[in-house]
Image: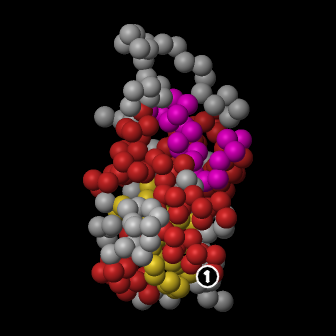
Amino acid sequence: MSDPTISILLVDDQPLLLQGFAMILSVEDDLHVVGQVGDGEQAVAAVARLQPDLVLMDVQMPVLDGIEATRRITAEHPLTKVVILTTFDRDDYLFDALQAGASGFLLKNADPDDLVAAVRAVALGHALLAPEVTMRVIRRMTDGEGAGGGAEDGSERELPLPLPQLTAREREVLSLMARGLSNSEIARKAFVSEATVKTHVSNVLAKLVVRDRVQAVIAAYDAGLVTPGP
């Protein structure tokens, strides 16, 4: 039996980009572009009509921006995943998009193979953050009253054990997730099976009451379990 087809809605106000993404995705047997629209309002309507598995969503668009469109889509159609398309110098919207329910981010200049792999990964339920974007989001989150920082006078302050509802092993797994490791990489690092890692990840998501790995990573940084590297 062949793999099920992943249906995709493309949302961008630049027709050439829409055409480019459509050409890249349409040559894959398991990917099917079901629609292309140019603003967030059209995206919300198209998702209601087409029920795609995944939306590739631009941020800055006329009529309704990608963040608000993402918020409406994830609230009204929780089975539809949204991946934000962004450029490296416009990442000031990313944290808001995470809060709106986006399952990940992809740079518009990503290689075609990376685009295809990202679509498949998110459709399977994995969260996606381009490494460059991840660090920008983390820095934004940890500015000022950033998680794990010192006291206002610059002195170190003692923090309580972060995320006490998690076991020591679950905190370890979450910390590795926050560093961008996949389940197989976590398994090798923690010397456990990949099936065990999947169980720990599921427990972490349930205990933190978050919808996916991206939201769990935000919780890890917010609690000070991990902090940005140099």
Q: Position of residue 140 (x, y in %)?
A: 39, 39
- Residue 216 lies, with reference to residue 3, above or below; the image says above
Mark 1 residue element: helix
Residue 147 placement, left or right of 135: right
Camera-side residue: 123 or 177?
Answer: 123
Instruction: Examine the structure image and report whether residue 113 is included in the region drawn in magenta.
Output: no
Query: Dividing the image into 4 quarters, which one contains the N terminus?
Result: bottom right
Quarter of the image where one finds residue 78: bottom right
| Crowding at mark 1 (Cα within 10 Å: few <14, some 14-19, many 20+) | few
Q: Position of residue 172 (x, y in %)?
A: 57, 37
Could you tell me which residue is drawn at 55 percent across and 31 percent down?
223
Q: Residue furthest toward the front?
A: 63
Residue segment shown in magenta: 207-227
Residue 230 placement, left or right of 177: left
Residue 217 placement, left or right of 165: left
Q: Position of residue 22 (x, y in %)?
A: 40, 83
Label 1 sits on residue: 50
Camera-side residue: 153 or 70?
Answer: 70
Could you tell me which residue is drawn at 48 percent across and 29 percent down?
147
Could you tell me which residue is drawn at 44 percent across and 37 percent down?
141
Could you tell me which residue is drawn at 50 percent across and 88 percent down?
29
Quarter of the image where one finds residue 17: bottom left
